[in-house]
Each structure stands twice: as structure tokens, then as C-alpha cells.
Image: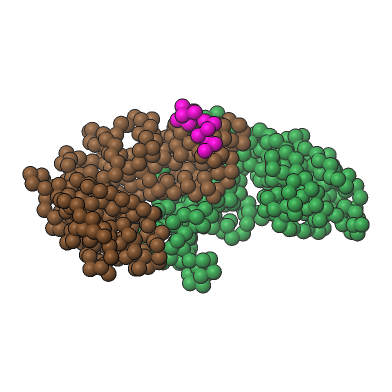
Chain colours: A brown, B green
Amino acid sequence: METGRKRDGAALIALDWGTSSLRGFLMDSAGTVLEQRANAHGIQNLPQPGLPGFEQAFAGLCGDWLAGNPGVPVVAGGMVGSAQGWAEAPYVACPADTGTLAGQAIAVDSAAGVRILIAPGVTYAPPDAPPDILRGEEIQIAGVLADRPDWAHQACMVLPGTHSKWVQIEDGRMTRFATYMTGELFAVLTKHSILGRLMPADADIEARADADARDAAFADGVRAAQASGPGDLSHQIFAARTLGITRRMAPELLKDFLSGLLIGHEMVSGLTRMGAALGSGRPLLLIGDGMLCRRYVQGLALLGIEPTARLENTAPKGLFQFAIAAGLIAPPAGKDTHV
Amino acid sequence: METGRKRDGAALIALDWGTSSLRGFLMDSAGTVLEQRANAHGIQNLPQPGLPGFEQAFAGLCGDWLAGNPGVPVVAGGMVGSAQGWAEAPYVACPADTGTLAGQAIAVDSAAGVRILIAPGVTYAPPDAPPDILRGEEIQIAGVLADRPDWAHQACMVLPGTHSKWVQIEDGRMTRFATYMTGELFAVLTKHSILGRLMPADADIEARADADARDAAFADGVRAAQASGPGDLSHQIFAARTLGITRRMAPELLKDFLSGLLIGHEMVSGLTRMGAALGSGRPLLLIGDGMLCRRYVQGLALLGIEPTARLENTAPKGLFQFAIAAGLIAPPAGKDTHV
């Protein structure tokens, strides 16, 4: 029998359920996080395969919250709503706001009788190019926009990561976006290509290279990207080998150089693609992990751009907005929660 | 005791010794291949590690040739001359011709008392970008130019592969070149990235997709590359996922689409980079494996370009030219062998 864990004021259980991790937030009616937990039971790493795995991971993370706070609504976002998730919440088309997400959310009932409302991902289909997709970032974006009607009016959001997203916001809605496989390219090139052979292990890089030299190598990569023409990437990355072989760059700096090249290419393309959203001092917002965002700040500075703000983990606030839009909880008194 | 294998007229043993394979050619004084052999004892796959591995692989492939034709000179090119090879033959700088290669070759004496002359690789150090390197291709190029003074005068050579090379030839010399990691990018993305997840195994692709549909998917990739701007690659490759997920392209065609994108990016950049070498009907030569070269012909056609010629395995002829330039054998009577 699950031991209940009652929390006064608990109004929502929110799950940020990705590929490699599961994060849970117990929130009050003002959107304040009362408790949070995380484990490694992302959808690719469940305690057992298939539906029982989702049930078990959910009960394992939230069982005491559910038992102690019966009737509290549960929402979830991220890869849990993908075709490989608990239940598929198909992509909704741009333009999309939190209301669109709530309107096309998918409910799943757990074996224990608890209903979970899962947010859909978003797709953008330009007229002249293949469609693009995202899932999980729409929740983070909802969290950013909740308190900032000025940003909701017009902004460009950059979410660095395995698959970085550049998203244009207009009138509170995501109107278009582009994915860059920057983080995954960096991972496969350093782990599986010839470029990784000259690169020491991360611990050795930490021990042997000082921060200024690493920043300079990163900047070399960004500047090379800035000088690049169409199609140049697969040529330029070979320099992460030749600079090492010809001893023009220390082996412990090659990884930062490659990182600068890849992030630089993303920025050169993303800034062009989102150009219309970036004119006349409109906000450029960086959302994500601290160290990676630091690199993006550094890269943007080399291109003459300073982000308006850096924000970390806006998913809890976004899931709260999603629950309000779905009518599961009431908006906090005195706040305009429309995005 | 090695059994000798005498061949009348044997004048040279030539080794094309790469990373994953070792190829041997017994040639006469006119450069005709009398016998050829190959095995998997590339420098990354020797029968045992280190020097004894090189000795054993060499004796295993050529022992009977050496015993039957005592005194015949031996030359080698490819990764056998790299820092991980039998003996390092350092890179020579552009501009470089076969004479430059011979002048800076490195001799190694085998345990059996046979001397092997190893060709160096070539480096190109542009004033405004990192240096580039190649090793092995210089021998193939020497083979192409041997009989064609018209091509030696002025040409652009494209050698598709794991690391494709675009090489400018002027007055019989390699004057500059650029490497593209196209083949390796394709391999790591299909094997190790999320893009490979939607792609069936090659045998299933063969069984399910017809050649016309695959050509069309390849062409879609090339055209997307043609329309790309600086930095767009890491965005565009994500379409090899989104086209599959949104069911706009059959899974068995995604690999050809990705191939077209990567080869297209290489071509867009390579044609720009080698632009000066390609004006006014100057030759564009494709050198390499049949199937891959067919894709390059198809891609170039989409960009409005028809290669002047396609050539396969010119390494034996190139090693023969290298041996002549090194004074190990006499030029065939009545031929101008200078490149």
C-alpha cells in the first residue's frame, strides 16, 4: 500500500518526461513548486518495456503524492507524448499557443485510475522546405511567456541542445521555428568519427587546458563559421583533425574548436532565418542549461549580438500554464495568464 | 622457406596500403599490371600490432613475388606513410608533383632486407584558413596525369569517399585542395545518430525501393543543398527525420535523401572553392569507386555540370610514375612521363 504524502496547498502534479529523464513537480495553486523529483526513467529507459514501464515509472515517482493528495490533476509534456511515449499526442501546426496545446492534448488513464493530460508537440511546415517538429520545447516556451507579455508580443527564442531550436514568437504564438542538430553532430563526431581520435578525454582536457585557451579555440571555430559559405561545414570540420596533426592547435583545444564551428554554423544560419524576428531591438532569449548557454552567449557576442535574457528550466511554469489552459486548475488571482 | 614466383618481365612491386586494405601490384617495365592481390591488412588491421605486423603483412602479400624476382624495387603509397604507418613520410607542401613526392619519399628496410620506398602525403596551407592534408590521393592523381598532358595543364579533380578531396591541378602540379568529410558524416549519421533510427537496413532498402524513387530522393537532397545558405547543413539534415515522421517520404528513401544533401553540400562548396579551376570548359575529373561516382555524376548534372571523365583505381599507374620519378625504374621508351 502506497504511503500518502499530503502537502497542504498541492494543486497540480506536473511531469517533464523526456527521452532520458523523468522530472516531477508538485505545485500549489499559484504555480510555486512545493517539491520536485527526478530519475533516469526517460521513455528510452523505463523500468520495463511498454505500458507497464510507463505505469511503474509514474507510480514510482509520484505514488505518494497521488495517495496523499487525491484528485490533484496531473499533466505531462515532452517525449511521453511521442509515438514511442505512453500515448501519442500528435503534433499541432504553427501558429500555436498554450491554448492550442491544451485543445489538442491527449488524456491517458493510469491503471491506478489517475488521468494524465499529455501535451502535443508542434510542427512547422514552410511552403518551400521539409516540415520541422519539436516536442517539449513548446512547454518551456509557454513557461517563458507566462509572465512576460512584452516577450510574447514579438521575440526569437533559442533553445540550445542535442537538437537546438530557434523559434519565432508573434502575438503570443509560435509562428515558425527551425531545428539544428548541433549537439548530436558534436556528440557523434567526437565519439564516432576520426575527429575524436586526436581529442583527449574530458577529464584530461579539464586538467591540461586553461579556460582562456579553450575560449579562444571556441572563438576560432565561431569565426571560421562566420567566414563560411554555403556547404562549407563538412570541409571546415576536417580542420579539427588537421590543426591537431600539424600541431597548430593543442589536442586539448580541438573539442572546443569543433564546438565553436558547429555552434557558429547554427548561429549564422539561425540569425539569417530568424532575421525578421530580430530587427529593431526585438528580444533574443536563450533558454537552457547554464554551461551550454554560456557558449551561446560567447558565440553571439562574437557576432555582435547580446541576448536579452538567459533562462533556465522554465518547464514547471510551462506545465502550470498548460494545466490552466486545459481548465484543470484556475488561473492565479490577478494574473493575466494568456499567452 | 618462401617459394619464389618468378614472372618474366617483372619490374616493380607497387603497394597501395591504406587504412583498411592492402593492395599489391606486380608490374612490368611498361607499367602493365602482371598480377594483383589484395587483403584486409590495412594499417588499422594488421595481423599483429606494430612493426612485426607491417613485416608480416608485407611478406604475406608479396613473399613469393620477392623470392621469385630478387632485386625488383618496391614502392608504397597511402596511410602506410602516416604517423601510424610503417614509417612516417611527412607531408610535402603544395605546389607538389610526382617529382616532389619522390624527392621527399622515405625508405624503410624490411627484416628480409628488401627496401620499400614510401610516398609522402601532401599538405595545403591557405593564408586565411586551417591547413588541409591528403595521403594516398596524390598517387591516384599521379596516375591520372601520367598519360594526359592536357589534364595536367589545368584541371579540377574530385575524389569522392570517406574524406572526399577536391584538387586543383595547374602545370602538372597539385596547387591547392580541400577535404570534405562527406562519406564519414553519412556513416556516423546513419549508424550513430537519431537519423538512422527511421532508416531500414540496406538489404530492405534494396528490396523495397526502386531505383527511380531512390534517384528522386537523392535529387531532393541535392536540390535542398543547392538552395541552402551558410550554416544550413545541421538544420537541413533534420529533414531526414521529419520527412519520415510526417510520412512525406518513405523510410526506405531517407538514406538516399541524406546522401543527396551531404553530397550536394560538398558540391556547392567545392564548385565555389575550385571555381577558378573550372572556368572556360576546363576539365572536371571524377576519380573513384563506380557506384559512388555515379551519385556524383547525378548530383553534378542537377547543378548543370557534366564531368569530363570518370576514372577508377589509378593507383597502380600512379605508383609506377612515383617509381620512375624516384629513379627506381626507367621511363618506358618513347613516353613523356613527366607530370
Q: What residue range appears in magenta?
A: A203-215
Magenta span contains residue A209:
yes
Residue found farthest to the bottom: B207
Foreground: A273 or A309? Answer: A309
Picture layout, residue B36 above or below residue B50: below
**Residue B308 location (% of width, % of height):** 59, 51
Residue A65 appears left or right of B51? left
Residue A212 appears left or right of A106? right
Residue found farthest to the top: A212
**Residue A265 location (% of width, % of height):** 42, 40
Picture layout, residue A298 above or below residue B27: above
Residue A301 appears left or right of A187? left
Q: Which image quarter is the N terminus of chain A in? A: bottom left
Residue at image position (59%, 60%) is B291
Magenta span contains residue B118:
no
Residue at image position (74%, 46%) is B50
**Residue A198 location (% of width, % of height):** 59, 40
**Residue B136 location (% of width, % of height):** 68, 45
- Looking at the image, can residue B159 be seen? yes
Picture layout, residue A212 above or below residue B7: above
Q: Looking at the magenta stretch, what is its main secondary structure?
A: helix
Residue at image position (62%, 36%) is A245
Which image quadrant is residue A227 in?
Answer: top left
- Looking at the image, can residue A92 be seen? no
How many marks overall?
0
Which image quadrant is residue A20 in?
Answer: bottom left
Residue at image position (23%, 33%) is A281
